[in-house]
């Protein structure tokens, strides 16, 4: 296994990806749209949103079926590059 594909995950697996950004700006739709481009059959009911104590930020978590580390890397790259995403975990 090359260093590029090294991971502790066994694919396919259920994977929860989280993105954080400003509240009330449509981040939920952005996360679903980006993950759906890279993973078939994304279930929007597997989406959860948590608001910060002050209400200025939200954390959006979407659980989906991941098939490879390159797939996850592509999702993280696209999420991190989006203007509404402050952090992706």
Image (cartoon, rainbow, N blue to C red):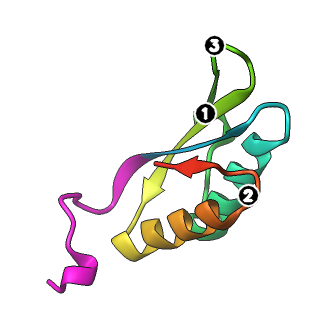
**In the image, residue 34 above or below residue 50:** below
Which badge, 2 or 1, comes first in the chain's sequence?
2
**Residue designated by label 2:** 33
Query: In x, y percent, where is residue 5?
Result: 26, 78
Instruction: Tell me if mark 1 has few (under 14), some (14-19) or many (20+) residues whose alpha carbon lies within 10 angstroms of its own.
Output: many
Q: Position of residue 2 (x, y in %)?
A: 18, 86
* Number of the label disc, if any, that sits on residue 59: 1
> Which residue is more in the foreground, 86 or 41?
86
Image position of 87 (left or right of 81): left
Looking at the picture, does residue 68 appear above or below residue 55?
Answer: below
- Counting residues from the N terminus, which is met first, the one under dot 1 or under dot 3? 3
Q: Viewer-proximal residue, 66 or 78?
A: 78
Quadrant assignment, res 66: bottom left
The residue sitting at 63% across, 13% down in the picture is 53
Give the residues in magenta. Answer: 1-15
- Residue 23 in magenta? no
Residue 5: in magenta span: yes
Quick one: label 2, few (<14), some, or many (20+) residues within 10 Å? few
Cα–Cα span, label 2 and label 1: 16 Å
Q: Quadrant of residue 35?
A: bottom right
Q: Quadrant of the N terminus?
A: bottom left
Residue occupied by mark 3: 53
């Amino acid at each position: 296994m090359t260093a590029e594909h090294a991971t502790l995950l066994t694919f396919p697996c259920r994977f929860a990806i989280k993105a954080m950004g400003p509240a009330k700006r449509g981040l939920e739709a952005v996360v679903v749209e980006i993950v759906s481009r890279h993973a078939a059959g994304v279930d929007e009911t597997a989406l959860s949103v948590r608001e910060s104590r002050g209400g200025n930020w939200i954390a959006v978590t979407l659980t989906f079926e991941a098939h490879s580390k390159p797939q996850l890397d592509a999702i993280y790259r696209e999420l991190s590059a989006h203007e509404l995403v402050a952090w992706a975990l």
